[in-house]
Amino acid sequence: MSNDLLRFEDEYLARYYSKKPLNITRGYMQYTWDSNNNRYLDMHTGFGVAFLGHRNPRIINAIREQLDRILTVSLTFYNEARAEFIREFTKIMPSGFGKVFLQNSGTEAVEVALKIARKVSKRTEFLAFLNSFHGRSLGALSVTGNEKYRKAFEPMPYKTRFAPFNAIDQVDKLVTEDLAAVIVEPIQGEGGVNPAKPEFLRALRQVTREKNVLLILDEIQSGFGRTGRTWAFENYGVEPDIFTAGKSVAGGLPIGIAAVRRELGDVFEPGEHGSTFAGNPLVMAAAKAGVETLLNEDVPGRVRTMGEEFMKILEDELGSLKPVLRVKGMGFMIGIELKKRAEPYIDRLIPMGLLTSVAGGTTVRLLPPYCITDDDMNMAVKALKTVLSENS
Ligand SMILES: Cc1ncc(COP(=O)(O)O)c(C=O)c1O
């Protein structure tokens, strides 16, 4: 960007993603604004983080109150903001789960899940799936089934077998007694918004149980109301041994959670696992307000109803357009799979006032906040229809 200030990002910020020429300065609920005061309907939501809206007033108030108390307390001491969050989280954690790990990102939550599996099983190898995404640290990359993210960093520290996602007939053969764990996203996010088939997840649960192998469900993108249930696995009637969460739980502040079944107990001895920032009081206050919002506003219920409506309109309006292969997803985790690269379409949606993201190269991914209205949905459909109808 040709701006005296922003050039510091170009010059000194290490490369992460390819960047869009947009300087976002402000957000409120489902909208963001750029430095020229143009408003955008945000279905990018910082890769799904702003699911509860930008600066949701409940979360802002909780953060403000905590600011007057304390900002850092290590896990060596008790802290009420932390305890209050945990109490709130137990309301949305299935009753079979007995412990939570509080981390600072989704990747860290996956890391701790893998460490637990290693320690509990005393085995080293994992089973994961093609097109999966579990994070960028070397451990999480080890179970990420996409060459693009791994290639430059091989060999990986954890040996992992990758199997085709949704290959129901292969589950029995793939899950062997020597595995530390199976890790899977109920709905692959980065891989292209691909929901697991119910029979596939159920078969994985059944066979892992029979063979005494842990099942980790990565709910970092699909969890916390995103699919119209608090956890995506509720759509499948399947409960894992460990599940991870992150993204939107603290309304925009960094968080990662790994929840562990009660019978696995404490897992680590004091000092075997740790984290300087984990359970940070400001994040905990925001996360407590996040869970309250989820429950008090019946976020999953709203998403379930509106998500069905949204998917139907998208299918009706876009399904027969030339570049469109299919509309897929669940709740407010929606993909429009194209016959070609999605990125040029995503770029053309920006000046029309709609922010989206790419998944799996050819899918335009919509991760709207729970608070979008019918008018917002119609605006998004109109913008998508326009760009997908253009000759290119
Ligand atoms: C399913 C899944 N797991 C793990 C991660 C990594 O989370 P984070 O980027 O917060 O480290 C992501 C991020 O997109 C994800 O979608």
Image (spheres, helix red, strand yellow):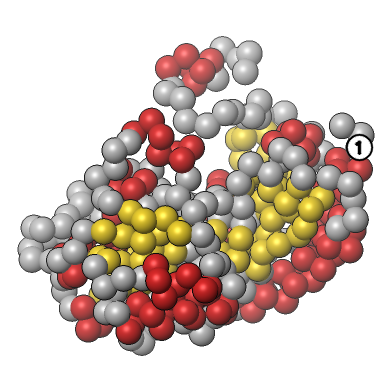
Give the x, y percent position of residue 126: 31, 60
Which residue in the rendered view is the most extreme toward the bottom?
Answer: 95
Residue 294 sits above or below residue 359 on the image: below
Residue 305 sits above or below residue 141 on the image: below
Would you say residue 164 is visible in this rendering?
yes
> Which residue lies at the image location 36% right of the left edge and 70% below the top edge?
175
**From the viewer's perspective, is 137 left or right of 144?**
left
Front residue of 75 and 103: 103
Q: Amino acid at mark 1?
A: Glu
Residue 10 sits above or below residue 104 on the image: above
**From the viewer's perspective, is 245 left or right of 391?**
left
**From the viewer's perspective, is 359 left or right of 345?**
left
Would you say residue 243 is visible in this rendering?
no
Which residue in the rendered view is the most extreme toward the left?
Answer: 270
Give the x, y percent position of residue 124: 21, 59
**From the viewer's perspective, is 58 left or right of 388?**
left
Give the x, y percent position of residue 218: 43, 63
To which quarter of the image does residue 373 belong? bottom right
Front residue of 5 and 48: 48
> Which residue lies at the image location 29% right of the left edge and 42% below the top edge?
156
Residue 23 sits above or below residue 5 on the image: below
Front residue of 381 and 148: 148
Dot 1 beta carbon under 8 Å from ligand 1: no
**Is disc 1 surrounded by few (<14), some (14 to 19) or many (20+) residues within 10 Å?**
few
For label 1, the residue is 390
At mark 1, the secondary structure is loop
Front residue of 317 and 194: 194
To which quarter of the image does residue 181 belong? bottom left
> Which residue lies at the image location 63% right of the left edge and 13% below the top edge?
2
Q: Quadrant of the N terminus?
A: top right
